Image: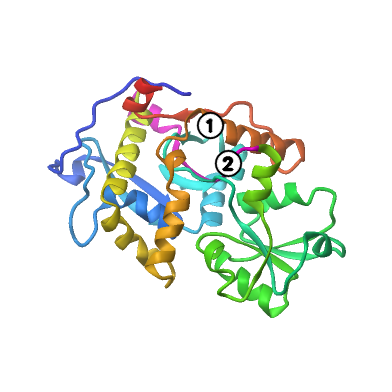
Amino acid sequence: MTSMTSMTSMTSKTSPSPDDRILLRLGHSPDPDDAFMWWPLFGIDGEGPEIVSSRFRFEQVEIDIEAANRRAEIGPDRLEITAFSCGQYPRVAGHYAITACGSSMGEGYGPKLVAARPMAMSELAAARPRIAIPGNRTTAAMTLGLRLQGIDYEAVETPFEEVGDRVLSGLVDAGVVIHEGQLTYEADGLHLVEDLGAWWWAETGEPLPLGVNAVRRDLEQLHGEGTLQEIAGLLERSVGFAIEHRDRSVSYAMGFGRGVPRETADRFIELYVNQLTVDAGARGLSAVNRLLTAAADAGLVPVVDQIDFVRGTTMAEEG
């Protein structure tokens, strides 16, 4: 684990003038679990943030996960803090460090490979299927590539919210659904071919790391030693506050659920804001290493030399 010298950050709701503080843009995908975690840094309902720093102020940037993947890789305007797909990390490791909190990991569940009719994997794989994926850089696409090693298929890059419709319309033979689509696909008239997270669990016994949260490495040089750990500590406090005030957090997150009932949004948050989100720890690090090693061995991503997590002061002391 990365351990860096701590810098003290005030966390009362009384703050200096925002203009005097360093702006940190935090990018997250527009789905309930991310919204649930980070609202305490921005504030809601016209109120100020619940987690306040004497050095930093936060700006919310809603960004599709594939757009976040590409922005982190290509730049030049890389966000200071951002979510991106775990499968994208090998391409951006020189620019970003993963934080120990904020990851989305499926423990025996994950993106769903679906079709318009009941279908076994063997039938789908038999004749070069066209499969809609929610972005070439997503972990969902990478995991599909691991599952279908040796099978000839065409990956059709598709906006995540259109995957189900394209499957039902017959434009593709199958598709991989993410976000709340993992819970609503049956109601949408789709049929499960395979749960990729369940497949990965059966193969490895490891959770499937889907999205990670990361901070830009150069912030340490720009703002002083210990900056990354200080920021990670604020992120940890945000997740903790959101969990402690769950009803309020879920109510806010509902606005990112694309019309799903509260029960569905709450269930999605329960699945992907779990103990590994609070602190991925050694188990989360093992899961990330296992997945990216397998993907690199399969030629799906570049080899990454080392993976470590940035932790806030409290976590670093406990770890």
User: Residue 309 location in percent, x, y?
Assistant: 48, 30
Q: Are marks 1 and 2 in contact (CB under 8 Å)?
A: yes
Does the magenta segment cover residue 164? no
Q: Is residue 305 visible?
A: yes
> Mark 2: which secondary structure?
loop
Inspect the image, locate mark 2, and give the three-letter code of the amino acid beneath it: Pro
Q: Residue at x 48, y 35 (%)?
A: 98
Does the magenta segment cover residue 207? yes
Residues 245 and 42: in front is 245
**Residues rendered magenta in the picture:** 205-225
User: Residue 31 location in percent, x, y?
Assistant: 44, 60
Residues 107 and 88: in front is 107
In which quadrant is the C terminus drawn?
top left
Q: Disc 1 or 2, which lies upstream in sequence?
A: 2
In the image, 67: left or right of 53? right
Give the residue at mark 2.
Answer: 207
Question: In terms of image quadrants, where is residue 302?
Answer: top right
* Protein image colouring: rainbow
Q: Residue at x 58, y 41 (%)?
A: 207
Q: Gap between marks 1 and 2, in whole Å? A: 9 Å
**Label 1 crowd bin: few (<14), some (14–19), many (20+), radius 10 Å:** few
In the image, 209: left or right of 272? right
**12 relative to 135, above or below:** above
Give the residue at mark 1.
Answer: 283
> Mark 1: which secondary structure?
helix
